[in-house]
Amino acid sequence: MAFDPTSTLLPLQPQPDPPLPTAVDSVDPSPSDAHDEPFPSDGDPSLPRVGMEFDSPETARSFYCAHAERVGFRVRNSKSFTSRVDDAVIMRRFVCSRQGRPSKKDPFDLTKKRRNRTSSREGCRAMLQVNRRENGCWCVSRFVLEHCHPLGLVTDLSPMKKLPTKPGVPLLTVPDLAPPRQNGLGPGGGVAQSLLEYFKRMQSDNPAFFYAIHLDHNNCIGNVFWADSRARMAYNYFGDAVSFDMTCKRNKRAVPFVAFTGFNHHRQLINFGCAFMTEESEESFAWLFDTWRTLMSDHKPTSITTCYSESVETAVSGVFPDVKQRFCQRDIFSCLKERLSDVYSSNPGFKPELKHVVKGSETPSEFESGWRSLLERYNLTENCWLRFFYNIRHKWVPAFVRDSFFGEVFEDIKPENMQKFFQRNSITTTTLRDLVTQFDKAMACQYEKELQADVLTTQARPVMRTASPMEKQASEFYTRTIFEIFQEELVESSSFFTESFEEQGPISKYRVVRYYDANNFHVVTYNPSEKILSCNCLKFEYKGIQCCHALRALIASGELLLPEGYFLKRWGRNAKANEFYLNLASDWVNDLCRDAIRLAEEGATCQAVYKAAKSALCKALQDVRYAKNGTFRLTR
């Protein structure tokens, strides 16, 4: 559904477009923002004054241009209004060339090159307005004398044309009489208008489709957000770890595309909503995050990964104060490579050692010692950039965020981002509407791959590598992709030995040491009565899969199976067990939305009918909740 500029949710029913005004420029003929200046009738006759009459608007303009030439400014045409009866022009307004503010180009038009041109507009309010009377003459109805800029020197940068000089007629300068310009949302088109019309058609076909617009300070479209029912339902299943992806916006082609993404139970890229953003201000990001949160019924993620941006960080902290936030490591490493180009070029070993310290440290103390040793070895202890990124280490170094779930199950494989997704699916950037169409087709293929992975998981039996009942237990729960990761952890656990060094009642602590590296060990705590298992490496908290250290300690304690609480449903083959396949559920959502719209239309006719509709809706919602909780048995 469309958002208004104040970001308030609108009803599900699409709203009709407002009627277009008959004026060339949709502004009140008598705006309240201008102040008329009184002029005495016995003043300078060369000065315009209210009440002066002319034979035609062209004559009035010539008189005002002559005045402008004497004073030292230029004139341009502004607003005109037509009659509702015969469409004849009944009002013309001429203004100083510095009136208004610099116009904003259509930010959504990717086919036009952007040029940085200087604008002469400064908000000057000087103007002359003439209205047509019943007798056919044109009378000055408003006149503003004051200018907000120095006079006497014409510095207008707009192109002018010289009219041929005639005897008795002063030399005037007038701009081209081009047809009135229309912005991207005006009648007749524009890139943004075409995009919004496409979204309206999508919403008509799929009532669960949602879009919102955000206006900038010039009342022009600055940002557009949209999400379909598939994205909203995917968030219900896998919205615990979210990434705010701006890689397409920041690549060489500078496509203004951003997305909320995540990963499903097959570790495949999924989409939670998209946006076109033309400005990177804190206000714009706050609007986007708040809009997205409202669409997702205020259901907050556990963690969110964003690009390295102070505006994004502030916006996320304001909208999601309790959500764990971190910066993308690739953004940080790219910044370091750019700021430390001389260090990278003169010390080839610095880059791999830096990544090893950041990614290989499991605890904050291990990172601190490794970082200090690295800086001393390369004599960089006083480097201001390394000091800066060290001060924000809790925002991007894994050792400081491992207590929250981010879903990074792969150690050496980079997760796919939107830029790679665009390249893999050959999504071009001709127009934004075409880009949206291509992206929707690519996401449809992505959903098909998810269904294929579901079928492969249920039909193909994985090969067991051990005789442990724990491996068989995991093979029956996890998807094929996640099971292979768990299987590696279980096999690796055989390279450790354990010793119990502390017991406090039912709680036992184990020291887990690798056979060939006795100096490094991990501490695992296990409470068999409450089935609580934890390791100081925090791999389960960070990735959602139990680590090899904890598995080894569990086996040493005599347990044959992993407690059920350590199998995250989001990694399981039944992660979407409460619903049928996502495409069928999407059809259900659209069907229910259509019924809800019909109920709203019928129920809003009068107060008595409204009360009956409201009561029926509340009862239906209660029955649905009972059905979801198992009070009623659903037939499948």
Image (cartoon, rainbow, N blue to C red):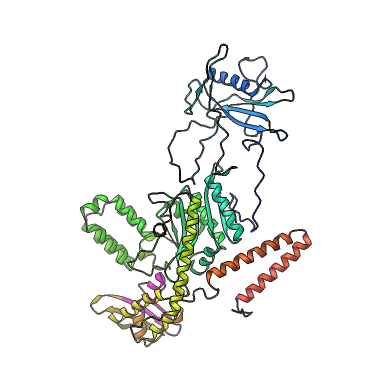
Compared with residue 153, is residue 398 higher up or lower down, i.e. above or below?
below
Q: Residue at x 54, y 68 (%)?
A: 583
Confirm whether residue 23 shows in the render. yes
Residue at the (44%, 79%) spot, across then down: 459
- Can you see residue 496? no
Which quarter of the figure has residue 533?
bottom left
Residue for point 55% across, 14% down = 166
Front-lying residue, 244 or 396: 244
> Relative to 329, is 569 on the left or the right?
right
Q: Quadrant of residue 100?
A: top right
- Residue 549: within the magenta? yes
Foreground pick, 26 / 550: 26
In the image, residue 201 above or below residue 564 = above
- In the rendered image, residue 419 lying in the magenta stretch gets the answer no
Q: Give coordinates of residue 53: x percent, y percent.
A: 68, 20
Task: Please give the range of residues in magenta.
Answer: 522-550
